[in-house]
């Protein structure tokens, strides 16, 4: 977007300016105000006036008390004011105007809500529209159907899927068919939108940016400009989450526990150098690699699969093909959940699928569909995925290019589709609701009816890596709390000793005891168990075990190691590397209680031989561990232990090279034992 001026910090209170002698022409707002780039601590408010003025915003948490203000000197007709220092997940009210007067009247219509902090589990409502900006009755009817749908007033994220205006992406078209369209313009004052461009948005961009007037020439995307880029204010520096892209051409943002990636199919180069595409893909890989959100939604205008107004098999649809062949493998490598597209003026929704990068003739239902059902929760057929990108559970691809556009007689026969809709009445939008580990997606026709719906559930229940040993000085009541993360709001906890379904259990152990909590998510069926070892200091000696050339004890305490009964200076970790023979022990402390191990006799001459050719890689591993021992290990048994010394996997080395899946393990230190060999490795997802 155009940069107008630097912003000064806001001040509490009102600033009154009295102008007695200067007479200025009347001003009025001709576009907006509208909202851009909401993040946990800020937002940008934009508007256009009929004459050049300075810029001022009043805001506060009550429409009758706009107690903060920001003003920007200098005269302009296109205004953009960024508010910072706001509270996350908070509703504010605002007015815009000049240093002399407010041009909007404070009311609940002029409001915005800052984004929650990343990872927040609050309910999220998303509305998505594609190929809508025709300024026609269908566009207005689609909008009205959504606004009459329950929960629309609580919409958090509004997605534009491209071809946001027709026919050429000119500024006046945006004014007439989007921002100024009666029956459509009334939502801009309170509902922020996030956009990607389509080919029609880019026609005017081509005129401004193309080389010698040749559309799609190989001009760097950083030089692309035009009305689309003047209108949006996208996060280029990661201020809304994700890896900074450094450009408004493509970007990422986060809202609660959803990560959004906004790609630009229109930076494609018809000279087929793929330079811009490849640079976007390089950024995409970096962003996906750091993504920790529960759900990931990708938006790109040109659909990889369609048999609507555009046929993805057509030899002229080079961009649709490039998206399918070059972008989809990256998205599926990181197990993206949903990809939203436009371009084709129909609604189409695929199965949960993986690995289809060719034309429709290469689609193989048996190998490419991860779940052959319709995904409807009401039918008992929701799509279930884990939260590990290493295991490809599949992606759903949706075309929603009919929020104002339509096709009279589309083929709608793409073999990967679960449901399709088109024709004279086939216009609508997407309603997406996310809460905790559940995502519900509905296709809402302009008639107000839900014509398609499906649900994705994430098996993301986790028990944090908290200490599972509780040390007591003497018998005393202790509260066991099965802390967990993820899951739905239907998680139950069953304790093996008390038969209690409470999340908290008070026990009174008089001897060392093990309590087991079984956690079950009723929504996904996922079950986990966690053990709590409650031990009395005078009845327990913490273990010492030798792994490789290191002495280890249990994690989760504070430590002091001893040699021959004398404390070792600086030896205060859960491990110790002995450099000479001796009798070693460790004292552990927790909750003011102390327990001491039995002596461990260490003899360097008995240190295991580490020169054998048993190797593990990669180290750290993300879940698949390769064990390599070509000569000396054949037929030997092996064990994998965690840092507590517990055996979590065992087997036999029947081949020189074997793979062990360890995807379900928590991050941490582990050990491979085979014969006298002890090899340390880490799991790091």
Image: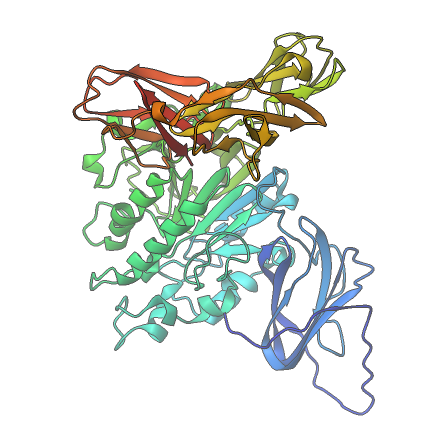
Q: Residue drawn 35% across and 47% down?
A: 407
Looking at the picture, tell me which residue is in the foreground, 57 or 24. 57
Can the viewer see residue 56 in this picture?
Answer: yes
Give the x, y percent position of residue 193.
54, 55
Image check: 92 left or right of 583? right
Q: Residue at x 61, y 21 (%)?
A: 596
From the viewer's perspective, is residue 569 above or below residue 381? Answer: below
Quarter of the image containing the C terminus?
top left
Q: Nearer the viewer, residue 447 or 610?
A: 610
Residue 15 against residue 424 in the figure, above or below: below
Determine which quarter of the picture holds residue 145: top right
Q: Is residue 563 left or right of residue 23?
A: left
Q: Residue 317: percent from the left, percent from the top?
A: 24, 53
Number of numbered tags placed on the structure image: 0
Work out whether residue 658 or residue 562 is closer to the camera in this orientation and state it.
562
Question: What x and y, as percent, mark residue 471?
Answer: 66, 21
Q: Position of residue 547 (x, y in %)?
A: 41, 25
In the foreground, 138 or 35: 35
Residue 643 in view here: no
**Is 359 above or below relative to 159?**
above
Q: Quadrant of residue 657?
A: top left
Quick one: which residue is furthest to the bottom in this view? 21
Q: How is the image coloured?
A: rainbow
């Amino acid at each position: 977007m155009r940069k107008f001026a630097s912003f000064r910090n806001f001040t509490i209170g009102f600033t009154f300016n009295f102008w007695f002698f200067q007479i200025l022409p009347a001003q009025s707002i001709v576009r907006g105000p509208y909202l851009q780039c909401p993040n946990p601590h800020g937002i940008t408010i934009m508007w256009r006036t009929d004459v050049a003025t300075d810029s001022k915003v009043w805001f506060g948490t009550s429409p009758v008390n706009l107690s903060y203000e920001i003003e920007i000197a200098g005269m302009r007709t296109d205004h953009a004011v960024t508010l910072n220092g706001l509270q996350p997940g908070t509703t504010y009210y605002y007015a815009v105007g000049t240093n002399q007067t407010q041009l909007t009247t404070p009311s609940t219509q002029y409001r915005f809500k800052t984004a929650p902090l990343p990872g927040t589990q609050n309910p999220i409502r998303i509305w998505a529209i594609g190929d809508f900006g025709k300024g026609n009755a269908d566009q207005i009817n689609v909008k009205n159907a959504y606004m009459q749908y329950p929960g629309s007033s609580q919409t958090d994220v509004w997605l534009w899927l491209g071809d946001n205006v027709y026919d050429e992406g000119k500024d006046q078209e945006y004014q007439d068919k989007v921002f100024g369209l009666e029956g459509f313009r009334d939502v801009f004052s309170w509902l922020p939108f996030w956009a990607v461009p389509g080919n029609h948005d880019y026609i005017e961009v081509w005129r401004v940016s193309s080389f010698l007037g040749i559309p799609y020439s190989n001009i760097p995307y950083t030089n692309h400009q035009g009305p689309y880029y003047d209108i949006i204010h996208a996060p280029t520096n990661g201020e809304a989450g994700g890896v900074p892209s450094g450009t408004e051409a493509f970007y990422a943002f986060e809202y609660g526990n959803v990560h959004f990636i906004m790609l630009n199919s229109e930076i494609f180069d018809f000279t087929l150098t793929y330079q811009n595409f490849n640079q976007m893909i390089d950024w995409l890989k970096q962003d996906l690699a750091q993504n920790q959100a529960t759900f990931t939604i990708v938006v790109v205008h040109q659909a990889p699969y369609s048999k609507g107004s555009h046929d993805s098999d057509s030899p002229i649809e080079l961009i649709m093909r490039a998206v399918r062949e070059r972008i989809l493998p990256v998205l599926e490598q990181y197990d993206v959940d949903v990809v939203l597209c436009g371009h084709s003026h129909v609604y189409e929704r695929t199965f949960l699928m993986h690995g289809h990068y060719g034309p429709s003739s290469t689609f193989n239902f048996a190998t490419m569909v991860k779940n052959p059902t319709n995904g409807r929760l009401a039918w008992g057929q929701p799509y279930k995925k884990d939260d590990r990108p290493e295991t490809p559970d599949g992606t759903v691809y949706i075309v929603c290019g009919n929020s104002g556009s339509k096709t009279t007689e589309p083929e709608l026969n793409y073999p990967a589709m679960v449901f399709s809709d088109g024709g004279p009445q086939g216009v609508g939008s997407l309603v997406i609701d996310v809460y905790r580990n559940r995502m519900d997606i509905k296709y809402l026709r302009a008639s107000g009816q839900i014509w398609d719906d499906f649900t994705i559930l994430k098996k993301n229940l986790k028990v944090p890596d908290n200490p599972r040993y509780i040390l007591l000085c003497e018998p005393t009541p202790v509260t066991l709390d099965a802390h967990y993360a993820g899951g739905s709001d239907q998680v139950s906890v069953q304790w093996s000793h008390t038969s209690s379904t409470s999340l908290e259990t008070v026990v009174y152990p008089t001897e060392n005891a093990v309590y087991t909590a079984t956690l079950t998510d009723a929504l996904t069926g996922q079950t986990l168990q966690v053990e709590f070892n409650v031990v009395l200091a005078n009845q327990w000696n913490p273990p010492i075990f030798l792994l490789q050339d290191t002495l280890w004890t249990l994690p989760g305490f504070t430590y002091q190691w001893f040699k021959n009964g004398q404390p070792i200076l600086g030896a205060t970790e859960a491990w110790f590397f002995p450099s000479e023979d001796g009798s070693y022990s460790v004292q552990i402390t927790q909750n003011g209680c102390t327990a001491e191990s039995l002596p461990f006799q260490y003899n360097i001459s008995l240190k295991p031989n580490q020169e054998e050719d048993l190797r593990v890689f990669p180290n750290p591993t993300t879940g698949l561990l390769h064990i390599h021992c070509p000569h000396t290990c054949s037929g030997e048994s092996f064990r994998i232990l965690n840092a507590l010394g517990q055996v979590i996997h065992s087997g036999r080395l029947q081949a020189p090279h074997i793979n062990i899946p360890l995807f379900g393990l928590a991050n941490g230190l582990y050990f491979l034992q085979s014969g006298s060999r002890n090899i340390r490795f880490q799991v790091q997802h």
